Amino acid sequence: MAVKQVNPTRMELSRLKKKLNTATRGHKLLKDKRDELMRRFLEMVRENRALRMKVEERIRQANANFVLAKASMSDETLKAALLAPKQEVYVTTSYRNVMSVDIPVFDTQTRTPDPNDIYSYGFAFTSADLDGAVKSLADILPDLIRLAEIEKSCQLMADEIEKTRRRVNALEHVMIPETQEQIRYITRKLDENERSTQTRLMKVKDMMLAQAHGY
Amino acid sequence: MSERIAVFGDRESVYGYAVLGLDVFYFDTSQDYTARFKKLCQNKNYSIIYITEAAAAVLEKEIEKYRSEPSPAIILIPGVSGNTGEGLSAVRKSVEKAVGSDIFNE
């Protein structure tokens, strides 16, 4: 590995040592963060899969119900029946912080508290199949919201895990070894300088002694 | 602040959701609906957007953009034409991104 050129000075050495210290500590923290994020992510993603399969199956059923309902009515009647929905759903989004990832929490309110307000039509001109279809879809809604919440969380966490893993790897395999190498280089250089001063002094002393006493 | 939920897809697949009080956006499959979807995503009033798998297949690039954004949550749902497995593969994508390989592969 090409080592970056550094000044072999004491100041640089102490700076690098501090840097190494911070890097090591950061590495440890980030590694812990990654592990914990991963644990939570796996937990969540498992739920996500199960919930998705359940919701998809139920939507399939609801869709089948709608097709049935449509088959027994004219298109116009159906359109008219569903033209003006009575109910409205509002979402309040708050965020929960999980290991520095803001994951959304969806809170839903309906405009009216009456669960029967999903039927926006009079029962006289529509088939009973439509009631069933609407009901089956309405039953899915809480799960559907929960799915949105959990799936978005999974996406956000996956993103954060990827970022954290990159940081951990960069610290572990690049930053820390590089700094260690630089520290080693400076230490060697400084030691070498000291030895060369020592020998020079000894040599000078020898010369002075020879001059003074003729050894 | 209260936001709304949007459902995006072909008419057959999504009209039922309107009764529940969700905002439904449907389109002709013959038209280009990328622009409409983009506009919908930028609309801060919608925090959840459900989109049919069939529509999502065309808008993959747009959806990809919002994966790492906190809002909106774009969630794939099966349309009336059937389940393509695209929704589960989105979950798989998250796992692959986080773990490096799909560990729930069966």
Image (tube, coloured by chain):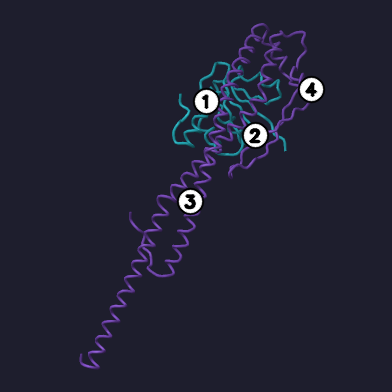
Chain colours: A purple, B cyan
- Reply above or below: A80 against A182: above
Residue labelled with disc 4:
A114
Where is residue B10 shown, x and y percent of the image?
Answer: 59, 20
Contact between marks 2 and 3 (CB within 8 A): the answer is no
Distance CA(mark 2)–CA(mark 4): 24 Å
Question: Element under label 3?
Answer: helix
Closer to the camera: disc 2 or disc 3? 3
Where is residue A68 shown, x and y percent of the image?
Answer: 63, 9
To which quarter of the image does residue B50 belong?
A: top right
Closer to the camera: disc 1 or disc 3? 3
Residue situated in front as seen by the camera: A69 or A189: A189
Identify the image quadrant of the C terminus of chain A: bottom left
Image mark 2: chain: B
Question: Element under label 2?
Answer: strand
Q: Residue at x 51, y 20 (%)?
A: B84
Residue situated in front as seen by the camera: B75 or A206: A206
Q: Amino acid at mark 4?
A: Asp
Image mark 1: chain: B
User: Of all residues shown, which one is farthest toward the left?
Assistant: A215
Contact between marks 2 and 4 (CB within 8 A): the answer is no
Contact between marks 4 and 3 (CB within 8 A): the answer is no
The 10 Å Cα crowd at callout 1, few under 14, some 14 to 19, many 20 or more, is some
Distance CA(mark 1)–CA(mark 4): 34 Å
Question: Element under label 4?
Answer: loop
Distance CA(mark 1)–CA(mark 2): 21 Å
**On residue A27, which mark appears?**
3
Distance CA(mark 4)–CA(mark 3): 54 Å
**On residue B88, which mark appears?**
1
Q: Amino acid at mark 2?
A: Ser
User: Do the residues at pointers 2 and 3 share their chain?
Assistant: no
Q: Is residue A86 left or right of residue B72?
A: right
Q: Amino acid at mark 3?
A: His
